[in-house]
Image (cartoon, helix red, strand yellow):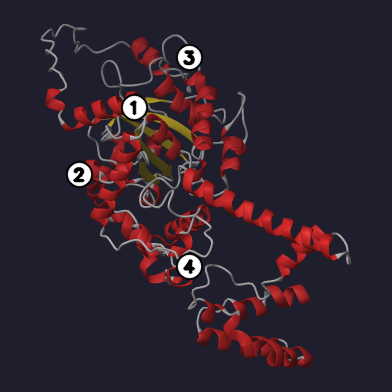
Protein backbone atom coordinates (compact mmCIF):
# COMPACT_ATOMS: atom_id res chain seq x y z
CA UNK A 1 0.00 0.00 0.00
CA UNK A 2 2.87 2.34 0.80
CA UNK A 3 4.49 1.75 -2.59
CA UNK A 4 1.15 2.34 -4.32
CA UNK A 5 0.74 5.65 -2.52
CA UNK A 6 4.32 6.78 -3.17
CA UNK A 7 4.28 5.92 -6.88
CA UNK A 8 0.70 7.05 -7.42
CA UNK A 9 -0.99 9.99 -5.74
CA UNK A 10 2.12 11.31 -3.99
CA UNK A 11 4.21 11.19 -7.16
CA UNK A 12 1.56 13.21 -9.00
CA UNK A 13 1.70 15.82 -6.24
CA UNK A 14 5.49 16.10 -6.38
CA UNK A 15 5.62 16.25 -10.19
CA UNK A 16 2.78 18.76 -10.64
CA UNK A 17 4.15 21.33 -13.15
CA UNK A 18 1.87 24.20 -12.03
CA UNK A 19 0.27 25.32 -8.80
CA UNK A 20 -3.20 24.68 -10.26
CA UNK A 21 -2.34 21.06 -11.06
CA UNK A 22 -0.75 20.77 -7.61
CA UNK A 23 -4.01 21.83 -5.92
CA UNK A 24 -5.97 19.35 -8.04
CA UNK A 25 -3.51 16.56 -7.21
CA UNK A 26 -3.82 17.31 -3.47
CA UNK A 27 -7.62 17.26 -3.64
CA UNK A 28 -7.54 14.02 -5.61
CA UNK A 29 -5.22 12.46 -3.01
CA UNK A 30 -7.41 13.56 -0.10
CA UNK A 31 -10.50 12.16 -1.80
CA UNK A 32 -8.85 8.81 -2.62
CA UNK A 33 -7.36 8.37 0.88
CA UNK A 34 -10.25 9.74 2.94
CA UNK A 35 -10.51 6.33 4.62
CA UNK A 36 -7.14 7.06 6.26
CA UNK A 37 -7.58 10.42 8.02
CA UNK A 38 -4.31 10.03 9.94
CA UNK A 39 -2.34 9.91 6.68
CA UNK A 40 -4.02 13.06 5.39
CA UNK A 41 -3.50 14.81 8.73
CA UNK A 42 0.20 13.87 8.70
CA UNK A 43 0.71 15.16 5.16
CA UNK A 44 -1.19 18.40 5.80
CA UNK A 45 0.78 19.09 8.96
CA UNK A 46 4.28 17.92 7.97
CA UNK A 47 4.86 17.91 4.21
CA UNK A 48 2.40 20.07 2.32
CA UNK A 49 3.29 23.31 4.18
CA UNK A 50 6.77 22.96 2.63
CA UNK A 51 5.58 22.08 -0.87
CA UNK A 52 7.60 24.89 -2.47
CA UNK A 53 10.78 23.01 -1.49
CA UNK A 54 10.08 19.75 -3.33
CA UNK A 55 7.15 20.20 -5.78
CA UNK A 56 8.17 20.85 -9.40
CA UNK A 57 5.72 23.74 -9.70
CA UNK A 58 8.10 25.74 -7.48
CA UNK A 59 11.47 24.01 -7.83
CA UNK A 60 11.34 24.47 -11.62
CA UNK A 61 11.60 28.21 -11.00
CA UNK A 62 14.81 27.93 -8.97
CA UNK A 63 18.39 27.67 -10.27
CA UNK A 64 19.42 24.48 -8.45
CA UNK A 65 21.68 22.75 -11.07
CA UNK A 66 19.90 19.46 -10.50
CA UNK A 67 20.48 19.33 -6.73
CA UNK A 68 16.99 18.59 -5.39
CA UNK A 69 17.85 16.36 -2.43
CA UNK A 70 15.92 17.11 0.74
CA UNK A 71 18.84 16.04 2.96
CA UNK A 72 22.17 17.20 1.56
CA UNK A 73 24.27 15.56 4.27
CA UNK A 74 22.85 12.05 3.90
CA UNK A 75 25.27 10.91 1.18
CA UNK A 76 28.22 12.59 2.91
CA UNK A 77 27.25 10.90 6.16
CA UNK A 78 27.12 7.48 4.48
CA UNK A 79 30.51 8.02 2.83
CA UNK A 80 32.09 9.09 6.12
CA UNK A 81 30.78 6.01 7.93
CA UNK A 82 32.43 3.83 5.29
CA UNK A 83 35.76 5.57 5.90
CA UNK A 84 35.56 5.45 9.72
CA UNK A 85 34.29 1.81 9.85
CA UNK A 86 33.56 2.16 13.59
CA UNK A 87 31.44 4.23 15.95
CA UNK A 88 34.33 5.50 18.10
CA UNK A 89 38.03 6.24 17.83
CA UNK A 90 40.80 8.56 18.96
CA UNK A 91 41.02 12.13 17.69
CA UNK A 92 44.14 11.59 15.60
CA UNK A 93 42.64 8.47 13.98
CA UNK A 94 39.34 10.15 13.12
CA UNK A 95 41.16 13.27 11.88
CA UNK A 96 43.37 11.23 9.56
CA UNK A 97 40.46 9.32 8.05
CA UNK A 98 38.34 12.44 7.57
CA UNK A 99 41.28 14.18 5.90
CA UNK A 100 41.83 11.15 3.64
CA UNK A 101 38.14 11.11 2.68
CA UNK A 102 38.19 14.80 1.72
CA UNK A 103 41.42 14.40 -0.27
CA UNK A 104 39.89 11.42 -2.07
CA UNK A 105 36.88 13.51 -3.06
CA UNK A 106 39.11 16.35 -4.29
CA UNK A 107 41.18 13.93 -6.36
CA UNK A 108 38.07 12.45 -7.95
CA UNK A 109 36.71 15.91 -8.75
CA UNK A 110 40.02 17.02 -10.29
CA UNK A 111 40.18 13.87 -12.41
CA UNK A 112 36.64 14.48 -13.66
CA UNK A 113 37.34 18.13 -14.49
CA UNK A 114 40.62 17.26 -16.22
CA UNK A 115 38.83 14.66 -18.33
CA UNK A 116 36.24 17.29 -19.27
CA UNK A 117 39.02 19.54 -20.60
CA UNK A 118 40.98 16.86 -22.46
CA UNK A 119 38.49 14.20 -23.61
CA UNK A 120 36.15 15.21 -26.43
CA UNK A 121 33.49 12.57 -27.12
CA UNK A 122 32.04 12.09 -30.60
CA UNK A 123 28.50 13.00 -29.59
CA UNK A 124 29.73 16.31 -28.10
CA UNK A 125 31.84 17.51 -31.05
CA UNK A 126 28.92 18.11 -33.41
CA UNK A 127 26.39 20.80 -34.08
CA UNK A 128 25.40 22.62 -31.92
CA UNK A 129 27.70 21.53 -29.04
CA UNK A 130 31.09 21.70 -30.77
CA UNK A 131 32.26 24.94 -29.13
CA UNK A 132 31.32 23.64 -25.67
CA UNK A 133 33.41 20.46 -25.77
CA UNK A 134 36.50 21.02 -23.65
CA UNK A 135 35.03 24.12 -22.01
CA UNK A 136 32.12 22.56 -20.07
CA UNK A 137 31.94 19.49 -17.86
CA UNK A 138 31.03 16.11 -19.28
CA UNK A 139 28.03 16.01 -16.97
CA UNK A 140 26.77 19.25 -18.52
CA UNK A 141 27.26 17.93 -22.06
CA UNK A 142 25.41 14.73 -21.21
CA UNK A 143 22.51 16.83 -19.92
CA UNK A 144 22.43 18.69 -23.23
CA UNK A 145 22.44 15.42 -25.19
CA UNK A 146 19.59 14.18 -23.01
CA UNK A 147 17.66 17.38 -23.70
CA UNK A 148 18.34 16.93 -27.43
CA UNK A 149 16.78 13.46 -27.19
CA UNK A 150 13.75 15.03 -25.52
CA UNK A 151 13.61 17.59 -28.34
CA UNK A 152 13.38 14.79 -30.91
CA UNK A 153 10.61 13.12 -28.93
CA UNK A 154 8.60 16.37 -28.88
CA UNK A 155 9.00 16.63 -32.66
CA UNK A 156 7.16 19.58 -34.24
CA UNK A 157 5.50 20.45 -30.91
CA UNK A 158 8.81 21.30 -29.27
CA UNK A 159 8.04 25.03 -28.93
CA UNK A 160 4.63 24.29 -27.42
CA UNK A 161 5.56 21.51 -25.00
CA UNK A 162 9.15 22.40 -24.13
CA UNK A 163 8.49 24.25 -20.85
CA UNK A 164 12.04 25.70 -20.90
CA UNK A 165 12.79 24.13 -17.51
CA UNK A 166 16.51 23.55 -18.13
CA UNK A 167 16.96 27.22 -18.91
CA UNK A 168 15.76 28.13 -15.41
CA UNK A 169 16.89 25.23 -13.23
CA UNK A 170 20.27 24.40 -14.81
CA UNK A 171 21.28 27.51 -16.72
CA UNK A 172 21.46 25.44 -19.93
CA UNK A 173 19.74 25.71 -23.34
CA UNK A 174 16.39 23.96 -23.37
CA UNK A 175 14.88 21.71 -26.04
CA UNK A 176 13.38 24.52 -28.12
CA UNK A 177 16.70 26.43 -28.14
CA UNK A 178 18.52 23.27 -29.29
CA UNK A 179 15.90 22.88 -32.03
CA UNK A 180 16.41 26.48 -33.21
CA UNK A 181 20.20 26.11 -33.16
CA UNK A 182 20.13 22.93 -35.26
CA UNK A 183 17.74 24.34 -37.85
CA UNK A 184 19.64 27.64 -38.10
CA UNK A 185 22.98 25.80 -38.39
CA UNK A 186 24.54 27.69 -35.46
CA UNK A 187 26.59 26.66 -32.45
CA UNK A 188 26.01 27.37 -28.80
CA UNK A 189 28.42 29.97 -27.46
CA UNK A 190 30.05 29.34 -24.12
CA UNK A 191 28.25 32.38 -22.73
CA UNK A 192 24.95 30.51 -23.13
CA UNK A 193 26.14 28.04 -20.48
CA UNK A 194 26.12 29.05 -16.83
CA UNK A 195 29.59 29.56 -15.32
CA UNK A 196 28.81 26.74 -12.89
CA UNK A 197 29.28 24.23 -15.73
CA UNK A 198 32.32 26.04 -17.18
CA UNK A 199 34.34 25.95 -13.97
CA UNK A 200 36.85 23.19 -14.70
CA UNK A 201 39.54 24.11 -12.18
CA UNK A 202 39.56 24.12 -8.39
CA UNK A 203 41.22 27.32 -7.18
CA UNK A 204 42.04 28.39 -3.66
CA UNK A 205 39.34 30.98 -3.26
CA UNK A 206 40.00 32.67 -6.61
CA UNK A 207 37.14 34.53 -8.22
CA UNK A 208 35.61 32.89 -11.31
CA UNK A 209 36.32 35.13 -14.30
CA UNK A 210 33.35 35.42 -16.64
CA UNK A 211 34.03 35.29 -20.36
CA UNK A 212 33.34 38.33 -22.47
CA UNK A 213 29.96 38.50 -24.14
CA UNK A 214 30.71 37.89 -27.82
CA UNK A 215 28.46 37.10 -30.75
CA UNK A 216 28.45 33.74 -32.58
CA UNK A 217 30.65 35.06 -35.41
CA UNK A 218 33.30 36.14 -32.93
CA UNK A 219 32.90 32.78 -31.22
CA UNK A 220 33.75 31.04 -34.51
CA UNK A 221 36.78 33.28 -34.94
CA UNK A 222 37.94 32.54 -31.42
CA UNK A 223 37.51 28.81 -31.98
CA UNK A 224 39.51 28.97 -35.21
CA UNK A 225 42.23 31.02 -33.50
CA UNK A 226 42.52 28.36 -30.80
CA UNK A 227 43.12 25.76 -33.53
CA UNK A 228 45.76 28.00 -35.13
CA UNK A 229 47.53 28.39 -31.79
CA UNK A 230 47.43 24.63 -31.27
CA UNK A 231 48.91 23.95 -34.71
CA UNK A 232 51.56 26.65 -34.24
CA UNK A 233 52.82 24.93 -31.11
CA UNK A 234 52.96 21.51 -32.81
CA UNK A 235 55.75 19.72 -34.64
CA UNK A 236 57.03 21.40 -37.87
CA UNK A 237 55.79 18.42 -39.91
CA UNK A 238 52.27 18.98 -38.58
CA UNK A 239 52.50 22.69 -39.42
CA UNK A 240 53.59 21.94 -43.00
CA UNK A 241 50.82 19.36 -43.46
CA UNK A 242 48.07 21.64 -42.14
CA UNK A 243 49.40 24.59 -44.16
CA UNK A 244 49.30 22.51 -47.34
CA UNK A 245 45.73 21.39 -46.62
CA UNK A 246 44.49 24.92 -45.99
CA UNK A 247 46.30 26.29 -49.05
CA UNK A 248 44.76 23.66 -51.33
CA UNK A 249 41.34 24.31 -49.86
CA UNK A 250 41.55 28.10 -50.25
CA UNK A 251 43.29 28.04 -53.65
CA UNK A 252 42.10 24.95 -55.57
CA UNK A 253 43.13 26.60 -58.86
CA UNK A 254 46.78 26.46 -57.77
CA UNK A 255 46.75 22.80 -56.72
CA UNK A 256 47.93 21.61 -60.15
CA UNK A 257 44.79 19.68 -60.99
CA UNK A 258 43.78 19.49 -64.65
CA UNK A 259 40.52 18.41 -66.19
CA UNK A 260 40.73 14.88 -67.63
CA UNK A 261 40.32 14.47 -71.34
CA UNK A 262 36.91 13.07 -72.31
CA UNK A 263 36.76 9.61 -73.82
CA UNK A 264 35.32 10.10 -77.27
CA UNK A 265 35.09 6.37 -77.99
CA UNK A 266 31.47 5.27 -77.89
CA UNK A 267 32.07 1.64 -78.71
CA UNK A 268 30.26 -0.85 -76.53
CA UNK A 269 27.82 -3.68 -76.69
CA UNK A 270 25.52 -3.09 -79.68
CA UNK A 271 21.89 -2.51 -78.87
CA UNK A 272 19.20 -4.91 -80.07
CA UNK A 273 15.50 -4.31 -80.54
CA UNK A 274 14.48 -7.88 -81.34
CA UNK A 275 11.88 -9.79 -79.37
CA UNK A 276 13.77 -12.16 -77.09
CA UNK A 277 12.79 -15.82 -76.85
CA UNK A 278 10.85 -17.43 -74.03
CA UNK A 279 13.90 -19.24 -72.66
CA UNK A 280 15.74 -15.88 -72.48
CA UNK A 281 12.88 -14.44 -70.44
CA UNK A 282 13.14 -17.35 -68.01
CA UNK A 283 16.91 -17.12 -67.67
CA UNK A 284 16.78 -13.38 -67.19
CA UNK A 285 14.32 -13.73 -64.32
CA UNK A 286 16.16 -16.45 -62.41
CA UNK A 287 19.73 -15.24 -62.61
CA UNK A 288 22.89 -16.42 -64.26
CA UNK A 289 22.92 -20.13 -63.76
CA UNK A 290 22.34 -20.14 -60.00
CA UNK A 291 18.57 -20.17 -59.74
CA UNK A 292 16.39 -23.06 -58.70
CA UNK A 293 13.48 -24.37 -60.68
CA UNK A 294 10.93 -22.35 -58.73
CA UNK A 295 9.35 -18.93 -58.82
CA UNK A 296 11.62 -17.37 -56.23
CA UNK A 297 14.93 -17.50 -58.06
CA UNK A 298 18.28 -16.51 -56.69
CA UNK A 299 18.65 -13.28 -58.61
CA UNK A 300 21.27 -11.89 -60.92
CA UNK A 301 24.95 -11.96 -60.08
CA UNK A 302 25.51 -8.24 -60.41
CA UNK A 303 22.23 -7.16 -58.83
CA UNK A 304 22.40 -3.55 -59.99
CA UNK A 305 21.09 -1.85 -63.11
CA UNK A 306 18.95 -3.92 -65.44
CA UNK A 307 20.69 -5.35 -68.53
CA UNK A 308 18.76 -5.96 -71.73
CA UNK A 309 15.20 -5.17 -72.77
CA UNK A 310 12.43 -4.39 -70.34
CA UNK A 311 10.61 -7.44 -69.01
CA UNK A 312 6.95 -8.02 -69.59
CA UNK A 313 5.16 -6.93 -66.43
CA UNK A 314 2.44 -9.52 -67.06
CA UNK A 315 4.95 -12.21 -66.04
CA UNK A 316 5.14 -10.84 -62.51
CA UNK A 317 3.44 -13.38 -60.25
CA UNK A 318 2.24 -10.70 -57.79
CA UNK A 319 0.98 -8.31 -60.45
CA UNK A 320 -2.53 -8.30 -58.98
CA UNK A 321 -1.06 -7.01 -55.71
CA UNK A 322 0.63 -3.96 -57.22
CA UNK A 323 -1.49 -0.78 -57.54
CA UNK A 324 -1.46 0.99 -60.86
CA UNK A 325 0.48 3.96 -59.47
CA UNK A 326 3.79 2.11 -59.92
CA UNK A 327 3.04 -0.58 -62.51
CA UNK A 328 4.00 1.64 -65.45
CA UNK A 329 7.44 2.33 -63.94
CA UNK A 330 8.47 -1.28 -63.20
CA UNK A 331 11.23 -2.41 -65.57
CA UNK A 332 12.49 -5.52 -63.76
CA UNK A 333 12.18 -7.42 -60.49
CA UNK A 334 14.17 -9.91 -58.45
CA UNK A 335 11.90 -12.28 -56.52
CA UNK A 336 14.39 -13.56 -53.95
CA UNK A 337 14.03 -16.75 -51.94
CA UNK A 338 11.38 -16.47 -49.23
CA UNK A 339 13.16 -18.11 -46.29
CA UNK A 340 12.78 -15.31 -43.77
CA UNK A 341 15.95 -13.63 -45.03
CA UNK A 342 14.28 -12.11 -48.11
CA UNK A 343 14.79 -8.52 -46.95
CA UNK A 344 18.52 -9.00 -46.54
CA UNK A 345 18.67 -11.08 -49.73
CA UNK A 346 17.44 -8.00 -51.61
CA UNK A 347 20.35 -6.03 -50.15
CA UNK A 348 22.88 -8.75 -50.97
CA UNK A 349 21.60 -8.96 -54.54
CA UNK A 350 21.81 -5.21 -55.10
CA UNK A 351 24.99 -4.25 -53.21
CA UNK A 352 27.00 -7.50 -53.07
CA UNK A 353 26.00 -9.00 -56.42
CA UNK A 354 24.56 -12.26 -55.07
CA UNK A 355 21.51 -12.78 -52.89
CA UNK A 356 23.19 -15.79 -51.25
CA UNK A 357 25.50 -13.31 -49.47
CA UNK A 358 22.68 -12.25 -47.19
CA UNK A 359 24.65 -13.30 -44.09
CA UNK A 360 27.36 -10.81 -45.05
CA UNK A 361 24.69 -8.15 -45.59
CA UNK A 362 23.32 -8.86 -42.11
CA UNK A 363 26.80 -8.46 -40.59
CA UNK A 364 27.32 -5.16 -42.38
CA UNK A 365 24.05 -3.73 -41.07
CA UNK A 366 24.70 -5.02 -37.52
CA UNK A 367 28.19 -3.49 -37.50
CA UNK A 368 26.82 -0.17 -38.74
CA UNK A 369 24.27 -0.12 -35.91
CA UNK A 370 26.84 -1.11 -33.29
CA UNK A 371 29.36 1.50 -34.45
CA UNK A 372 26.83 4.34 -34.13
CA UNK A 373 24.90 3.43 -31.01
CA UNK A 374 24.47 7.09 -30.06
CA UNK A 375 22.42 7.62 -33.22
CA UNK A 376 20.52 4.34 -33.63
CA UNK A 377 19.30 4.34 -30.04
CA UNK A 378 16.85 7.01 -31.26
CA UNK A 379 15.82 4.89 -34.25
CA UNK A 380 15.56 1.33 -32.89
CA UNK A 381 12.89 1.65 -30.21
CA UNK A 382 13.61 -1.79 -28.80
CA UNK A 383 17.22 -0.85 -28.09
CA UNK A 384 20.45 -1.20 -30.05
CA UNK A 385 21.39 -4.53 -28.47
CA UNK A 386 18.03 -6.07 -29.33
CA UNK A 387 18.31 -4.76 -32.91
CA UNK A 388 21.79 -6.26 -33.35
CA UNK A 389 20.58 -9.59 -31.93
CA UNK A 390 17.69 -9.61 -34.42
CA UNK A 391 19.83 -8.66 -37.43
CA UNK A 392 22.64 -11.15 -36.76
CA UNK A 393 21.86 -14.64 -38.09
CA UNK A 394 24.30 -17.42 -39.04
CA UNK A 395 22.29 -18.51 -42.07
CA UNK A 396 19.42 -20.76 -43.09
CA UNK A 397 15.68 -20.40 -42.59
CA UNK A 398 14.85 -17.94 -39.79
CA UNK A 399 11.75 -17.08 -37.80
CA UNK A 400 10.08 -13.70 -37.39
CA UNK A 401 12.52 -12.85 -34.56
CA UNK A 402 15.16 -12.20 -37.23
CA UNK A 403 13.09 -10.58 -39.98
CA UNK A 404 13.97 -7.18 -41.40
CA UNK A 405 12.13 -4.29 -39.73
CA UNK A 406 10.67 -2.19 -42.50
CA UNK A 407 11.57 1.25 -41.12
CA UNK A 408 14.24 0.83 -38.46
CA UNK A 409 16.62 -1.17 -40.68
CA UNK A 410 16.30 1.22 -43.61
CA UNK A 411 18.40 3.88 -41.85
CA UNK A 412 21.62 1.84 -41.45
CA UNK A 413 21.17 0.57 -45.03
CA UNK A 414 20.95 4.10 -46.39
CA UNK A 415 23.83 5.33 -44.21
CA UNK A 416 26.36 2.56 -44.90
CA UNK A 417 25.89 2.45 -48.68
CA UNK A 418 25.04 6.17 -49.08
CA UNK A 419 21.88 5.30 -50.95
CA UNK A 420 18.24 6.26 -51.06
CA UNK A 421 16.09 3.37 -49.83
CA UNK A 422 12.58 3.47 -51.28
CA UNK A 423 10.16 1.12 -49.54
CA UNK A 424 6.90 0.30 -51.30
CA UNK A 425 4.63 -1.43 -48.84
CA UNK A 426 1.63 -3.18 -50.36
CA UNK A 427 -1.35 -4.38 -48.38
CA UNK A 428 -4.69 -5.34 -49.86
CA UNK A 429 -3.85 -3.77 -53.20
CA UNK A 430 -3.05 -0.35 -51.69
CA UNK A 431 0.31 1.28 -51.07
CA UNK A 432 0.96 1.35 -47.33
CA UNK A 433 3.36 2.01 -45.80
CA UNK A 434 5.55 3.77 -48.37
CA UNK A 435 8.54 5.91 -47.50
CA UNK A 436 11.93 7.09 -48.67
CA UNK A 437 14.94 7.03 -46.33
CA UNK A 438 18.18 8.91 -47.02
CA UNK A 439 21.56 8.75 -45.22
CA UNK A 440 21.47 10.62 -41.91
CA UNK A 441 25.08 11.84 -42.30
CA UNK A 442 27.60 12.31 -45.10
CA UNK A 443 31.23 13.18 -45.73
CA UNK A 444 32.08 16.78 -46.58
CA UNK A 445 32.53 16.03 -50.30
CA UNK A 446 29.29 14.00 -50.68
CA UNK A 447 26.27 16.01 -51.79
CA UNK A 448 23.66 13.36 -52.60
CA UNK A 449 22.99 9.61 -52.44
CA UNK A 450 25.00 7.61 -54.94
CA UNK A 451 22.33 4.95 -55.63
CA UNK A 452 18.67 4.11 -55.21
CA UNK A 453 17.25 0.75 -54.18
CA UNK A 454 13.54 -0.04 -54.48
CA UNK A 455 12.14 -2.71 -52.17
CA UNK A 456 8.59 -4.02 -52.51
CA UNK A 457 7.13 -5.31 -49.23
CA UNK A 458 4.17 -7.66 -49.62
CA UNK A 459 2.76 -7.34 -46.13
CA UNK A 460 0.17 -10.10 -46.59
CA UNK A 461 2.93 -12.59 -47.43
CA UNK A 462 5.61 -10.91 -45.27
CA UNK A 463 7.89 -11.08 -48.30
CA UNK A 464 10.35 -8.63 -49.86
CA UNK A 465 11.04 -8.26 -53.59
CA UNK A 466 13.62 -5.98 -55.18
CA UNK A 467 12.35 -3.83 -58.03
CA UNK A 468 14.06 -1.93 -60.82
CA UNK A 469 12.03 1.17 -61.60
CA UNK A 470 12.50 3.71 -64.36
CA UNK A 471 15.08 6.45 -63.66
CA UNK A 472 13.47 9.58 -62.26
CA UNK A 473 10.25 7.77 -61.36
CA UNK A 474 7.99 9.18 -58.61
CA UNK A 475 8.96 8.21 -55.07
CA UNK A 476 7.03 8.38 -51.77
CA UNK A 477 7.69 11.15 -49.22
CA UNK A 478 10.66 11.03 -46.87
CA UNK A 479 10.16 9.34 -43.51
CA UNK A 480 9.40 11.83 -40.73
CA UNK A 481 12.01 10.16 -38.52
CA UNK A 482 14.74 11.10 -41.02
CA UNK A 483 14.15 14.81 -40.38
CA UNK A 484 14.52 14.18 -36.64
CA UNK A 485 17.78 12.21 -36.70
CA UNK A 486 19.63 13.74 -39.66
CA UNK A 487 22.89 15.61 -39.20
CA UNK A 488 23.65 19.08 -40.63
CA UNK A 489 25.72 17.53 -43.45
CA UNK A 490 22.57 16.20 -45.18
CA UNK A 491 20.25 19.15 -44.60
CA UNK A 492 18.87 20.14 -47.99
CA UNK A 493 19.05 16.68 -49.54
CA UNK A 494 15.27 16.53 -49.46
CA UNK A 495 15.23 19.22 -52.15
CA UNK A 496 16.89 16.79 -54.60
CA UNK A 497 13.80 14.56 -54.55
CA UNK A 498 11.19 17.29 -54.13
CA UNK A 499 9.86 17.07 -57.71
CA UNK A 500 9.60 13.27 -57.69
CA UNK A 501 7.82 13.27 -54.32
CA UNK A 502 5.37 15.90 -55.58
CA UNK A 503 4.66 13.74 -58.64
CA UNK A 504 4.00 10.74 -56.37
CA UNK A 505 1.56 12.74 -54.26
CA UNK A 506 -0.19 13.94 -57.41
CA UNK A 507 -0.59 10.38 -58.71
CA UNK A 508 -2.02 9.32 -55.34
CA UNK A 509 -4.81 11.85 -55.72
CA UNK A 510 -5.76 10.33 -59.07
CA UNK A 511 -6.13 6.80 -57.72
**How many angstroms separate mark 4 from mark 3 (CA)?**
63 Å
**How many angstroms separate mark 4 from mark 2 (CA)?**
45 Å
Residue 443 seen from this side: no
Tell me the crowding category of disc 1: few under 14, some 14 to 19, or many 20 or more residues within 10 angstroms, Cα based.
Answer: few
Label for residue 238?
A: 1
Query: What secondary structure is found at the residue carrying circle 2?
Result: helix
Answer with the quarter of the image where residue 161 lies: bottom left
Query: What secondary structure is found at the residue carrying circle 4?
Result: loop
| Residue 195: percent from left, percent from top | 43, 64
Quarter of the picture holding the N terminus: bottom right
- Mark toward the start of the polypeptide (3 vs 1): 1
Q: Is residue 149 left or right of residue 55?
A: left
- Label 2–label 3 contact, CB within 8 A: no
* Residue at the image point whose x is 53% and y is 48% from the top: 114
Badge nearest the viewer, 1 or 2: 1
Tell me the crowding category of disc 2: few under 14, some 14 to 19, or many 20 or more residues within 10 angstroms, Cα based.
Answer: some
Label for residue 170?
A: 4
Residue located beneath label 2 in the image: 499
Q: Is residue 49 above or below residue 313?
A: below
**How many angstroms separate mark 4 from mark 1 (CA)?**
40 Å
| Residue 386: percent from left, percent from top | 60, 42
**How many angstroms separate mark 3 from mark 1 (CA)?**
56 Å
Amino acid sequence: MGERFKNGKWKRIMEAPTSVEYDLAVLNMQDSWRAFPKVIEYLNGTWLPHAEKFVLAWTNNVLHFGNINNCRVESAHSMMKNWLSCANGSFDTVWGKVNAAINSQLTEIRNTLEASMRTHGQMWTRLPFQHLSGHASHYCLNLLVKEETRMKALSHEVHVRCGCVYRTTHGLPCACQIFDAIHSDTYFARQQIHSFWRTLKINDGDHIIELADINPCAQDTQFFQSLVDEVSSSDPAVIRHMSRMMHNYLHPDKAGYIQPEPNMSTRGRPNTRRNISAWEHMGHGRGRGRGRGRGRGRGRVRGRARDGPQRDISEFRYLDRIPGIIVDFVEDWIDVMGDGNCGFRCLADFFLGDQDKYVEARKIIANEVGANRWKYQHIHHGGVDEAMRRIKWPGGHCTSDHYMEVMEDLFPIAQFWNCAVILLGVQGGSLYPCMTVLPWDAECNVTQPSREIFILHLIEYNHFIRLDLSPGCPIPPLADLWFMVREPSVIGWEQIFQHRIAEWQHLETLV
